[in-house]
Image: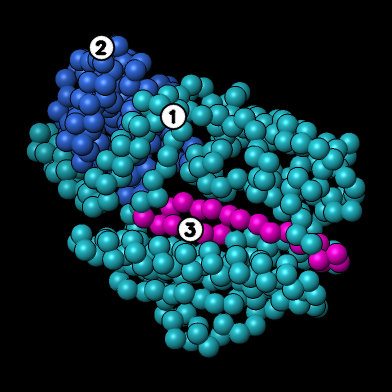
Amino acid sequence: MDEKLEKLKKEYMDVPIPEELDSVVKKTLKENRLNNVNKKSKFKKIKIAVTSIAAAFIAFTIGINTSAAFAATLSKVPVVGSIVKVLTFREYTVNEGTFNSNIKVPAVQGLENKTLENSLNEKYLAEGKKLYEDFEADMKKMEASGGGHLGVDSGYEVKTDTDRILSIGRHTVNTVGSSSTTMKYDTIDKKNEILITLPSLFKDDSYVDVISENIKKQMVEQNKADSDKYYWVAGIEKDSSMELFDKISKDQNFYINPDGKLVISFDKYEVAPGYMGIVEFVIPTDVLSDILVSNEYIK
Amino acid sequence: MGEINLAEEFTNYVIKNEEKFYRLAFSYVKNADDALEVVQESTYKAISTIDSLKTPEYLKTWFYRIVVNTSIDLLRNRKKVMVVDDKTLSNYDFGMVDHYADIDLQKALENLPIQYRSIIVLRFFEDLKIEEIAAILDENINTIKTRLYKSLKMLRIQMDD
C-alpha cells in the first residue's frame, strides 16, 4: 500500500506549475489588499492567464489561415443588407510562438450621415490600434522577462440588421491564464441615421431602476430553475464579501434584438462567476412600456 | 494594526506555498486554467475576508479550506461531480471489485467520491494531521478517521488484482 501511495504522491507532485502562477497570486494579493484597506472590496480579476497547449494550437491555426492571405482579404465582407454595411476594415495579426493576436476592426459604410459614420469608424480604428499597441507592449515586456503566453482576440458581429435597426457588437478576449471577455455595442437607427443610446430610449432616468429590478428578478428565477445559473446577486450569493449586483449603469451595454426587444449585456465577471461568460438579459417590453419615449425601436 | 499584520502574514504564507495550493486545486479540477482560477479566487476570498479570521493560528487550515471549497464549487458548477450518499457508496464498495480490478492507480484514486479523495490528498500528499483535515473539511475527527480507513480500503480493493 505504501508503495502505491508513494507513486500516487509522485504523480500529484509532478503536476507542472504554470509560470503565470506567481504573478497571478501576487497581483491578486496586491490589488485586493489595497481595496481591503479602503474597505471597498471589488474583486479585481487579473487578466493574466495560462494558455493551454490546445489553445495555442487553435491560435496557431488561425494564424496560418489569416497571415498573408488576410491582408488581401480585408476586402468587403458584406454582412449587412443593401445600403448600410459593416465590413472588416483592418486586421492586426501577430503569430509568434506563444504570442498570438487577432484583431479585426469593423467599419460601417453607406450611411448618409457621414459625421456619424466617421465618428464610429474612427472610434473602432482607435480602439483596434490601442489593443494592438497594448498587446505589443505586453509582449515586449514578457519577452524581456523570459517569455510567457499572451493572446488577444477581437472581432465583431452584427447582432441585428433590420430595415430600421443595426446593432453591432464588438468583443475582445484577453488570454493570459484564464480569459476575460468584454463586449461593446453600437446601435444605429438606419432610417434617421442616428446612434441610439440607452438614455435616449426613455422618458427619464427611472429606466435604471426598472431594468435593474427586472434583471435581478430574472437572475433569481434562472437560478431557481437551474442552480448552475449563478449570479452575484442578493437572493443567490450568500458570501457577504462579494460585491452584489445592484443597478445597471446609465450607459450599460445594450442592443436591440431582431424582435425589437431590449437586451442588456454584462461582461464576463461583471455580475457572475467566470464560467457564466458574457451574460445577457432580454427585458420584456411590457415592463418598459410606461417609460419608453416611443415604440419606434422597442416593440 | 493586528489586521495588517495578519494580512502580511497571509500574503507571505500564500506566496511561499502557492505551488502547493495550485497542485491541490489541480487535483480537483484537473486542468491548468481552472486550477489557476481556483487559486486566484481563493486568494481573493481570503485576502478580502481576512478580518473575519479571529485566530491567526488557524490561518493555514482556513486557507486550505477556502481552496478545497472553491475547487468543489467550481466542479459543482460544471456538473462534473456527483454527490453520492452512503448507501450508494456501500454498493459501490462491494460491487465494483471485478470491474475496477485492472485500472491504474490514478484512475482508482479518481474514482473515489470527492469527500474521500480529499482526505487521501490532504493526508498523504499534503502530509496534514487528522485534526487539521477535520478542521479543513469541517467534519469531526472520527468521521475523518472512518472515511480515511474506508477510502484506503476502497483503493486497495480497486487496486489489488
- Under mark 3, the amino acid is Val
Q: Which mark is residue A173?
A: 3
- The residue at 30%/11% (across/down) is B54
Image quadrant where residue B57 sits: top left
Chief secondary structure of the magenta portion = strand
Work out which quarter of the rendered image holds the N terminus of chain A and state it.
Answer: top left
| Chain letter of the blue region | B
User: Is A99 left or right of A215, judged from the image as shown?
Assistant: left
Query: SS at mark 3?
Result: strand
Numbered mark located on residue B23 in the image: none
Q: Which residues are magenta?
A: A171-193
CA neighbours of label 3 inside 10 A, class few (<14), some (14 to 19), many (20+): many
Residue at 16%, 39% in the rendered image: A9
Chain coloured cyan in the rendered structure: A
- Is A228 displayed left or right of A27 in the figure? right
Which residue in the structure is indicated by mark 2?
Answer: B55
Kind of residue at badge 1: Ser
Of the pair A295 and A215, the residue shown nearer to us: A295
Give the residue pinned by disc 1. A41
